[in-house]
Each structure stands twice: as C-alpha cells, then as structure tokens.
Image (cartoon, grey):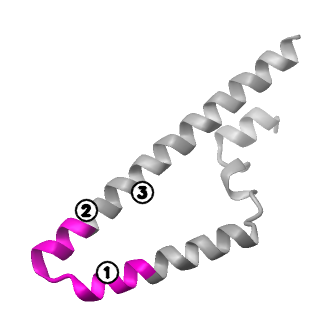
Amino acid sequence: MSTLQDLWYGNIRPNEDKVITDEEKELVSLIARHHEKLSSFLKNDDLNVFEKYIDCFTEYASLIECQAFEIGFKLAVELLKE
C-alpha cells in the first residue's frame, strides 16, 4: 500500500505521532485541575454554559489543528515540486 493510501485509510495518523513535551503535560494537568475546580463551583445553568464553552473551544482547536495540517501538507508538496 502506498503512503497516500495508508494516510487515506487511517493507517498513518500524523496528529497521533507527536511526542508530548513536559511543558505540554504540565499545561494539560493545569487545564484539568482548573476544569475540575470550576466544575465543582458551578451549578445547573452555569455548569451547562461552561461545558458548552469547553465543547466549542475543543471543536475550534480541532479545526485549527486541521488547518495547520493542511497548510503544512500543501507547503511540503510545494517544496517537493521545486
């Protein structure tokens, strides 16, 4: 199977091959701790709004990650053409 076919069929997952740095681990830990603390303070409607905010932010981050991948892929193709 070619590399493009592997990419198409999901056998290659560039976003999963990334090594997570200690700085990123610390940031994720802080995010989780703050999320837990806020969730314990908020009640009912406020908690629902907060959870919707988190969902929207996560979706936005995913879109940005996809765009960055596309830009990088297009750049790589342009470099290979040269």
Residue linked to disc 2: 52
Q: Is residue 42 magenta?
A: yes
Residue 77 left/right relative to 10: right
Residue linked to disc 1: 38
Label 1 sits on what residue type?
A: Leu
Q: Is residue 53 magenta?
A: no
Is residue 14 shown above or below 73? below
> Which residue appears at 38% of the width and 55% of the height?
57
Element under label 3?
Answer: helix
Quadrant position of residue 3: top right
Label 3 sits on what residue type?
A: Thr
Magenta stretch: dominant secondary structure: helix
Q: Position of residue 42 (x, y in %)?
A: 20, 82
Residue 66 left/right relative to 12: left
Residue farthest to the left, as pictured: 45
Label 2 sits on what residue type?
A: Lys
Q: Position of residue 61 (x, y in %)?
A: 47, 50
Quadrant (top left, top right, bottom left, bottom right) of the C terminus: top right
**Mark 1 near mark 2, Cβ–Cβ under 8 Å?**
no
Residue farthest to the bottom, as pictured: 40
Residue linked to disc 3: 58
Spatial distance from mark 3 to mark 1, Cα to Cα? 17 Å
Element under label 1?
Answer: helix
> Which residue appears at 65% of the width and 38% of the height?
8
Quadrant (top left, top right, bottom left, bottom right) of the N terminus: top right
Q: Earlier in the sequence, mark 3 or mark 1?
A: 1
